[in-house]
Amino acid sequence: MTAAQKRQQSVDAAYILDDQVGFILRQAQQRHTNIFASLMIEELTPTQWAVLAKLRECGPCSQNLLGRQTAMDAATVKGVIDRLTKRGVTATTSDPVDGRRLLVALTPEGEAVYARAKPMAERITAATLEPLSETEREALVGLLRRLA
């Protein structure tokens, strides 16, 4: 083997895809997404569930704030809200303080969907983290929060 081939082999060996954080995170996300799809009820998507959970947690809020709180851009959160509103799960009203702004809130049906879906969301989290000990779970979530 020539010196150039040895250098190339060293460069090639230095980058192993399976050891790269982005690749591993994507695999973990795919696993979680599959678990979510297999367990979540009412054909809720992860983004729809995020909106329902955040509205339940915080109450009515603007689309802009809801997008920021759920890590969605304006177009994505608008689409999610439009689909949930069409299903009767959310409703929009004008903000009494600023009539130009829309507030999004859960409807009574949205509250009921949230109540039915919450136990499934808890099962999804438990299934996603199942291979880890309790200490490892806490450490992973803490580290991921630092990266987010």
Image (spheres, grey):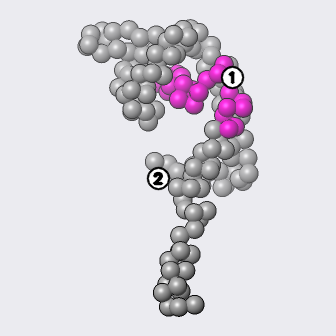
Q: Name the image quarter holding residue 38.
A: top right
Which residue corresponds to the image point at 43% horizontal and 28% vertical from the top-left? 76
- Identify the mark nearer the N-term, 1 or 2: 1
- 130 to 61, vertically: above or below: below
Place of residue 126 in the rendered image (x, y in percent of width and height, measured from the top left): 70, 40
Q: Which residue is situated farthest in the front direction here?
A: 2
Q: Which residue is situated farthest in the bottom direction here?
A: 2
Which residue corresponds to the image point at 53% horizontal and 70% vertical from the top-left? 15
Which residue corresponds to the image point at 63% horizontal and 44% vertical from the top-left? 30
- 89 to 124, vertically: above or below: above
Pointer 1: residues within 10 angstroms few (<14), some, or many (20+)? some
Q: Bounds of the magenta span?
A: 34-58
Question: What amino acid is at disc 1?
Answer: Ile
User: What element does badge 2 sit on?
Assistant: helix
Which disc, if any, is residue 76?
none
Place of residue 71 in the rendered image (x, y in percent of width and height, measured from the top left): 44, 36
Q: Nearer the viewer, residue 113 or 134?
A: 113
Residue labelled with disc 1 = 41
Residue 63 forms part of the magenta stretch: no
Residue labelled with disc 2 = 147
Majority secondary structure of magenta residues: helix
